[in-house]
Image (cartoon, grey):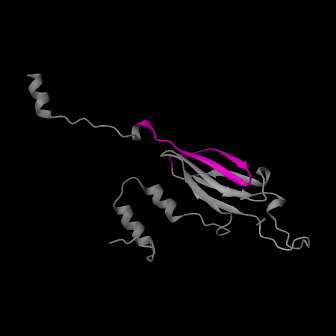
Amino acid sequence: MVSLAPHSAFTANDLERFMGLSIGFDSMFNRVANFPQQENGAYPPYNIRKEDDFNFVIELALAGFSEKDVEVELTENVLSVRSVGEKGKQNLDTPDYVHRGIANRSFSRKFTLADDIVVNGAEFENGLLNITLEKIVPDEKKPRIIPITNPSMIEHKEK
């Protein structure tokens, strides 16, 4: 039995068992196995907000940065947010600071998106980068009622 309790570690063996119980999830399991590693741990801090069943917002706190200091890129379902240019290079030799509590260092944060998630845009305001995402559900994947037929009734009507 697979345990997903916080104290147990999820292993490759568990992944193989899940794969044996699913059909068509190969790409999802491959993405989990190759999950991108974060370079800077918890920096920058972020929230993922669910606005409704189909819309999400990733909020990154980037105090001291502006829109020209940040790059957002989507490549093969991996959304990357990183610092660019000189802004991300922290100069600790500046004598004018008594205390430096606002991080001003380079960063890279990656998010793996599902196949049905699209990035609608990114806005930078008041030190927050907001990236809007939308889950697109094609008509063939929306819930529908499957009619139940009775073959004996069809034969009976034809006579």
Query: Which picture quadrant has residue 100?
Result: bottom right
Is 131 inside the magenta-drawn segment?
yes
- Which residue occupies the foreground of this view, 77 or 97? 97
What residue sits 47% from the left and 57% below the top? 28
Is residue 7 placed above or below 52 in the rendered structure? below
In the displayed orientation, state which residue is furthest to the bottom: 7
- Which residue occupies the foreground of this view, 22 or 84? 84
Residue 34 appears at what percent x and percent y?
Answer: 54, 64
In the displayed orientation, state which residue is furthest to the top: 159
- Which residue occupies the foreground of this view, 135 or 49? 49
Magenta-colored span = 115-139
Is 152 inside the magenta-drawn segment?
no
Point out the image quarter for the N terminus: bottom left
Q: Main secondary structure of the magenta part?
A: strand
What residue sits 42% from the left and 55% below the top? 25
What residue sits 46% from the left and 60% below the top? 29
- Which residue occupies the foreground of this view, 142 or 127? 127
Query: Which picture quadrant has residue 12?
Result: bottom left
Residue 19 appears at what percent x and percent y?
Answer: 38, 62
Q: Left or right: 25 with respect to 116?
A: left
Q: Left or right: 59 with respect to 17?
A: right
Is residue 124 placed above or below 157 in the rendered structure? below
Residue 106 appears at what percent x and percent y?
Answer: 76, 64
Query: Which picture quadrant has residue 148?
Result: top left
What residue sits 69% from the left and 46% below the top? 123
Point out the image quarter for the C terminus: top left
Residue 22 appears at what percent x and percent y?
Answer: 36, 57
Count of numbered labels shown in the rendering:
0
